[in-house]
Structures are given as structure tokens and as C-alpha cells.
Image (spheres, helix red, strand yellow):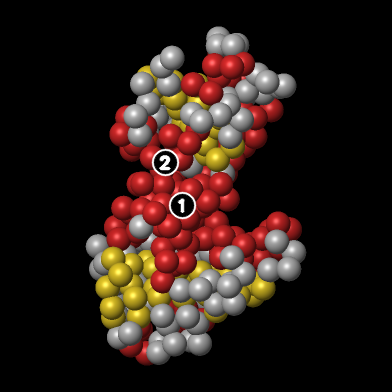
Amino acid sequence: MKKILIQFDTDSHPSVFDRVVAVDAGVDELFSYGGIHPDNVTSLVHGAIFTRGPADLKNTSIFVGGSNVVEGEKLLAKVRKAFFGPMQVSVMMDSNGCNTTAAAAVAVAGRHMTLKGAEATVLGATGPVGFRAAQLLAREGAHVSVVSRTLDRASAAVDSILEKYPSAKLRAVAADTSAEAESCCRSQQLVIAAGAAGVCFLQEGALSRLSNLKLAIDLNAVPPVGIADISTTAKAVDHSGTICYGALGVGGLKMKVHRLALQNLFEANDRVLDVESIYDLALQLVARG
Ligand SMILES: NC(=O)c1ccc[n+]([C@@H]2O[C@H](COP(=O)([O-])OP(=O)(O)OC[C@H]3O[C@@H](n4cnc5c(N)ncnc54)[C@H](OP(=O)(O)O)[C@@H]3O)[C@@H](O)[C@H]2O)c1
């Protein structure tokens, strides 16, 4: 039976990026729909779950994407609400690459250092990627500084992570300038910069001043990059004793994670691939080497 991936995109044009990855992941047929929102998705989900018998439904899966992560989350919830009993298909959400990127970044970090007990800072931790990276670091037992330009937003992110991991060691920190961002990273072993595209947090020379830093990961590929000392293509490059990754350096694993997650959807009809389960897949890939 053919593997059909149904792409629900909250943008008017379904993402070309997500379509290419679907083809590369080996789906047989890709049905792409744009302009999808919670109010118009249910009948489309019914089309997915009522056409094949329960035993064959693992050959149909849904991918939720689009540039708006909040809308993607609402859409995922509505898709799941349309399922009942055995009448369901596996579903993955990766709006704007938020889950695969955060999962790849934290899996890369775990390749180089023990995360449990590590002092870790996430800059730009209130965005979809940074928030998820902070959440995964908390899950791994790191002591996470959650950084935003405003303390309110940092505290809200911390509270949200604590709901999931009540014993997590988290600290909300406000940093509105490069000097403050650098100050947040002092005494830290890991920094993940997950600021908006084109936002530089750590100016040139910062890494040589941050002598405790073992690993620095910058996810912003749009100049100026988030950590000026790291080139976008850096992949396990040493800079002043710090192992560095740029956005494209993490991108290879992110792409593999995305493809593996799509393949994983077709193993059963009840998978829900969110950041946690996508991270588990990223760990599998890292373990394979
Ligand atoms: N490598 C990849 O494959 C890949 C895939 C997806 C995304 N990305 C990159 O990952 C990064 C994070 O993505 P995202 O969607 O989570 O980002 P985002 O939501 O656009 O921004 C993340 C955070 O950056 C902070 N920020 C925004 N403008 C700022 C400014 N002018 N100065 C300082 N801080 C600012 C905001 O935090 P506060 O308002 O709380 O300060 C915001 O919550 C982006 O650079 C994106 O391009 C990479």
C-alpha cells in the first residue's frame, strides 16, 4: 500500500522545504494543502481516516507545518481532536522547523558534553526554537538560564517548562544588550543562541572571554549571526577552547531528524511527533554516529 503524507500548512502556500524533505524521506504520495486552520481542517482529517481500514491507516500520515508556530500548535490540537478510537493516523508538527531544530541542537550538545548538571544558557529562549531547546535541556537535567530581553517573558517561559518538569533547575534572566547577554554566559558551559534571524547576541571576541564555555551553538544563519565568532558552517570547530556549531553545522542533523521523523510516522497509526519524541529520534541518530 502506498505511503501517503498529507501536509497541512497554515501558510497559503505549502512549504516547499517541507515538501522536498517529504520526497527525500521516501513518501509515495504527498498531498499538500495551504491556508489550513483549525476551522477548516476537520473534514480533511476525516478524508484521511475514513478511506483506509484501521489496519492500513499506518500508511497515511499527517504533517503540520507553516511559518506560524502558535497556529501550528492549534492546528495539531484540532487534528488530534478529529481522531477517535482506532480511526486515527500518525501526525508530526514542525512549524517553521521548531521541533527538529531544537531537537538537533540539544542532541548535538549531548554529543559533546554531559548535560545533566551542566550550566546552560539559552539566548532567545522565548521563541519557538529556543523555548523548546530550553525544555529539552531541562529534561536532560541541565541547569538552564532562560534568557529574554524582558524578565516577564523569560519568567513565563520558565513557568511553562516547570509545568512539564516541576523539578527542573531553571533561571529566568533578562538581557537587553550584548554586554548583558555575554554576562549571562559567564560561568556557563553551554550556550545555545536561538534569537530571531539577524540578531547578534555575542559580539566578536566574546568566546575568548568566556573561558568556562565548552560548547556554543548558534542557530541563526542570517547575518549578523547570533554569535559573531561562529561561522554559519562551523561544525565542531574549536574557538578559544570552545567547541562551536553554526546554524548550518547543526542543519545536517536537523535534516536527518526531519526525514527520520517522517519515516517513523509510517510505522504505526498513533504516533504524535512533537518536540519530545522528535528529540528521542535525534538521540537515536546521534547514537548511531
Ligand atoms: N538552522 C535551522 O535549520 C533553523 C531552523 C529554524 C529556525 N532557525 C533559526 O533559529 C532561530 C530561532 O528561531 P525562532 O523561530 O525561535 O526565532 P524567533 O521567534 O524569531 O526569535 C526568537 C527570540 O529572539 C528574540 N528577539 C527577537 N528580536 C530580537 C532583537 N532585535 N534583539 C534581541 N532579541 C530578539 C525574542 O525574544 P524576546 O522578545 O523574549 O527577547 C524572540 O522570542 C532563528 O534565528 C531562526 O532563523 C534555524
Q: Is residue 34 above or below residue 101?
A: above
Q: Secondary structure at mark 1?
A: helix
Give the residue drawn at x 36%, y 57%: 289
Asked if one can make out residue 133 in the rendered structure from this viewpoint, the answer is yes
Asked if one can make out residue 98 in the rendered structure from this viewpoint, the answer is no
Q: Position of residue 45 (x, y in %)?
A: 58, 20
N-terminal of the two: label 1 or label 2? 2
Residue labelled with disc 2: 260
Q: Residues within 10 Å of mark 1 (few under 14, many from 20)?
A: some
Give the residue drawn at x 53%, y 23%: 58
Q: Is residue 88 above or below residue 21?
A: above
Q: Amino acid at mark 2?
A: Leu
Give the residue drawn at x 28%, y 66%: 235
Q: Secondary structure at mark 2?
A: helix
Q: Position of residue 165 (x, y in %)?
A: 70, 61
Residue labelled with disc 1: 284
Q: Are marks 1 and 2 in contact (CB under 8 Å)?
A: yes
The answer to whether mark 2 is within 8 Å of ligand 1 is: no
Report the mark closest to the observer, 1 or 2: 1
Label 1 and label 2: CA atoms lie apart by: 10 Å
Horizontal side of residue 206 vs 179, given as left or right = left
User: Quarter of the image holding residue 90?
Assistant: top right
Is 59 or 194 nearer to us in this picture? 59
Horizontal side of residue 156 vs 286, given as left or right = right
* Number of callouts: 2
